[in-house]
Image (cartoon, rainbow, N blue to C red):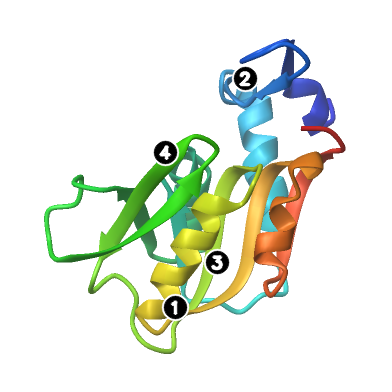
Amino acid sequence: MKKIEEYVRSIPDFPEEGIIFRDVTSILQDADGLQLSINLMQEKLKDIEFDVVVGTESRGFIFGVPVAYNMHKPFVPVRKKGKLPCETISMKYDLEYGTAEIEMHKDSIKPGQKVVVIDDLIATGGTIEAAIKLIEQLGGEVVKVIFLMELAGLEGRKKLAAYDVDSVICYDGK
């Protein structure tokens, strides 16, 4: 079986010159790559006690749901503003150019619940930092944050320094 890194398609000079885009779709489009990615992320939870998995829109859903399913845990989606039908809480955060806003249902996390956050990629860490703030606002405790890929050169871990953060693949660059 191939190593997980071998399933990642690297696209030079996208979205701009000098950037190497790490494409997760090449993992998803290969049955072995998809299964391996889920297994490797799930393996990082073998000694972690938790109650619920949270994933951010949209690729956090792709990786978070199978982990939650396999471990018989509920899954809570964090969505872009305006996509959830019930009462929500929201958080604005900064992007490289502008701002974004995410939200989750007010009743999705119970006080004292231990939460694992899963996403496909950590770059600057802004989205996950905002998601963690929402979880904590509802009384949840984030016990682990897992990414399939990490772009270490963008230093997203600094924003998440207070948390147990792990990634399956780590690229030194941006």
Q: Amino acid at mark 2?
A: Asp
Residue 17 horizontal/vertical position (percent): 73, 11
- The residue under the point 81% across, 29% down is 5
CA gap between label 2 and label 4 equals 19 Å
- The residue under the point 39% across, 59% down is 75
Task: Name which of mark 4 and mark 3 comes first in the sequence.
Answer: 4
| Residue 116: mark in rendering | 3
- The residue under the point 37% across, 87% down is 111
Task: Name which of mark 1 and mark 2 comes first in the sequence.
Answer: 2
* Image vertical order of residue 11 relative to residue 97, above or below: above
Contact between marks 4 and 1 (CB within 8 A): the answer is no
The answer to whether residue 67 shows anywhere in this view is no
Quadrant where the C terminus sits is top right
CA gap between label 1 and label 2 equals 36 Å
Q: Which residue is mark 1?
A: 136
Task: Name which of mark 3 and mark 1 comes first in the sequence.
Answer: 3
* Image vertical order of residue 138 relative to residue 116, above or below: below
Task: Name which of mark 3 and mark 2 comes first in the sequence.
Answer: 2
Residue 165 falls in image quadrant: bottom right
| Residue 58: mark in rendering | 4
